[in-house]
Image (cartoon, rainbow, N blue to C red):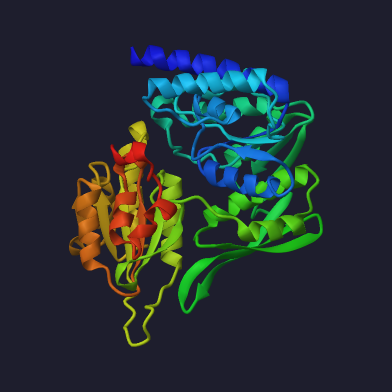
């Protein structure tokens, strides 16, 4: 009964969304890939909204129901029948009455199962398609027969691109770059660190203040112009790619790269994606609790390995310990065990202490021990509450802790346990809405 109700709601909202697109004719940026969709979508919004009236997908509204909700500008009603009825009425008002509708929509488009994007691409015709990253073991592969099938599903958006549209693609990703052939004669803009890309990043650095990490800086070159970019409050190369994709979208619309660089100084990256958070006992937390996948975890561990931290108080001795708190990576299907073991092998060379959360993450511990990480430095827990209590008990001044895991493991609860200012959790952490709190 619940599925029947859900399908009816999806059908009605999709029909309303199609009618709204037909009536208001907004330009559309569709962002897809396996890693970096939300961060790219948010960066693109920052750039475009400095010039145009823009609406973006809220949070990670990237599904067959999330996309119509974004187009209609409506909230997720979850299990509330009356709120869904109100959503349908509000959608009708948007169709019948005259409204001040956005000129641009920045939509995140995901795929949990085969056919998800293909269905959407039958009626969604983007002006710009952004392809982020397609790793060897993508997230959500559980319901696909192969990596190639995942890539094929993502490629449906390129086929839906308007005749005068632009394909923006990560040039450092071979699988993604190979898809530019599907764009045919349409305009293609590439981005990355690779020479020959349309938009090239270089000179990646971590910004420090009083010996503690505060953000990242890098330089971007395009067609003879070169601009410095700084992003505060985050770490990792994975935050550079979304910025490059946003610049590419702006360039496709004739925006000035220097002006965009200025706008991006105020860009707020989304919560739970390599965010720097003050921890208890003057420690440093790298909050990457939104989600996890093999490639994203690899990049996060590389960032942990490369960053330094100092205690706030000069009289305190810097421990500079690196702690990795890692939860299950979900929806990996037959790749799961191997992916977790490989993550453990990398953790052994990136961290001094490992705390695992969940039954799958036990293989991370196994991989770490097989790579000569001492057993006494590895702690295994089945739930985030217990792991958070352990972390709180061992954190010292100057420690740097990476916290990362898939959504269902609820790693943000660990961040909440060890953050210095828990009263800021509603602003700084993921999954703080009422619908998540009751789960």
Q: Quadrant of residue 81?
A: top left
Position of 390 compared to 141: left or right?
Answer: left
Q: Position of residue 190 (x, y in %)?
A: 70, 45
Position of 251 compared to 306: left or right?
Answer: right
Q: Position of residue 211 (x, y in %)?
A: 46, 78
Residue sitting at x 68%, y 34%: 102
Q: Nearer the viewer, residue 418 or 115?
A: 418
Q: Position of residue 217 (x, y in %)?
A: 60, 65
Position of 302 compared to 206: left or right?
Answer: left
Evaluate whether residue 247 shows in this view.
yes
Quadrant of image for the C terminus: top left
Tally the numbered discs: 0
Residue sitting at x 53%, y 15%: 12
The answer to whether residue 205 is above or below residue 100 is below
Q: Position of residue 336 (x, y in %)?
A: 33, 38
The answer to whether residue 330 is above or below residue 78 is below
Q: Nearer the viewer, residue 154 or 266?
A: 266
The answer to whether residue 358 is above or below residue 222 is above
The answer to whether residue 211 is above or below residue 302 is below
């Amino acid at each position: 009964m619940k599925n029947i109700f859900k399908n009816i709601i999806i059908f009605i909202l999709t029909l309303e969304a199609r009618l709204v697109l037909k009536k208001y004719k907004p330009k559309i940026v569709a962002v897809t890939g396996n890693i970096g969709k939300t961060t790219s979508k948010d960066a693109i919004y920052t750039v475009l909204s400095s010039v145009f009236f823009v609406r973006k997908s809220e949070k990670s509204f990237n599904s067959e129901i999330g996309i119509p909700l974004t187009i209609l500008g409506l909230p997720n009603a979850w299990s509330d029948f009356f709120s869904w009825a109100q959503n349908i009425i509000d959608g009708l008002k948007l169709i019948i009455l005259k409204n001040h509708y956005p000129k641009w929509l920045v939509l995140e488009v995901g795929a949990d199962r085969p056919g998800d994007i293909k269905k959407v691409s039958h009626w969604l015709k983007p002006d710009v398609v952004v392809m982020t990253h397609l790793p060897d073991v993508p997230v959500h592969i559980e319901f696909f027969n192969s990596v190639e099938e995942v890539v094929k599903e993502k490629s449906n958006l390129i086929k839906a691109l308007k005749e005068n549209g632009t394909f923006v693609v990560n040039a450092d990703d071979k699988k993604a770059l190979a898809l530019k052939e599907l764009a045919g004669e349409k305009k293609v803009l590439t981005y990355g660190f690779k020479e020959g890309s349309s938009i090239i990043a270089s000179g990646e650095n971590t910004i420090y203040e009083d010996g503690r990490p505060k953000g990242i800086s890098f330089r971007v070159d395009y067609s003879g112009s070169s601009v410095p970019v700084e992003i505060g409050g985050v770490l990792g190369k994975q935050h550079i790619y979304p910025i490059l994709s946003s610049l590419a979208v702006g360039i496709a619309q004739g925006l000035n790269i220097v002006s965009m660089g200025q706008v991006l100084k105020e860009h707020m990256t989304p919560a739970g994606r390599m965010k720097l958070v003050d921890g208890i006992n003057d420690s440093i937390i790298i909050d990457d609790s939104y989600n996890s996948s093999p490639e994203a975890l690899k990049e996060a561990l590389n960032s942990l390995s490369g960053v330094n931290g100092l205690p706030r108080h000069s009289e305190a001795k810097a421990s500079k310990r690196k702690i990795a708190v890692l939860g299950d990576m979900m929806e990996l299907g037959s790749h799961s065990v191997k992916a977790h073991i490989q993550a453990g092998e990398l953790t052994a060379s990136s961290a001094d202490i490992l705390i695992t959360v969940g039954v799958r993450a036990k293989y991370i511990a196994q991989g770490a021990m097989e790579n000569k990480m001492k057993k006494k430095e590895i702690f295994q827990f089945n739930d985030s509450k217990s792991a958070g209590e352990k972390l709180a008990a061992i954190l010292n001044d100057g420690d740097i802790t990476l916290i990362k895991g898939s959504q269902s493991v609820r790693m943000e609860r660990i961040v909440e346990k060890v953050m210095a200012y828990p009263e800021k959790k509603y602003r700084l952490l993921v999954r703080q809405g009422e619908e998540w709190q009751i789960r």
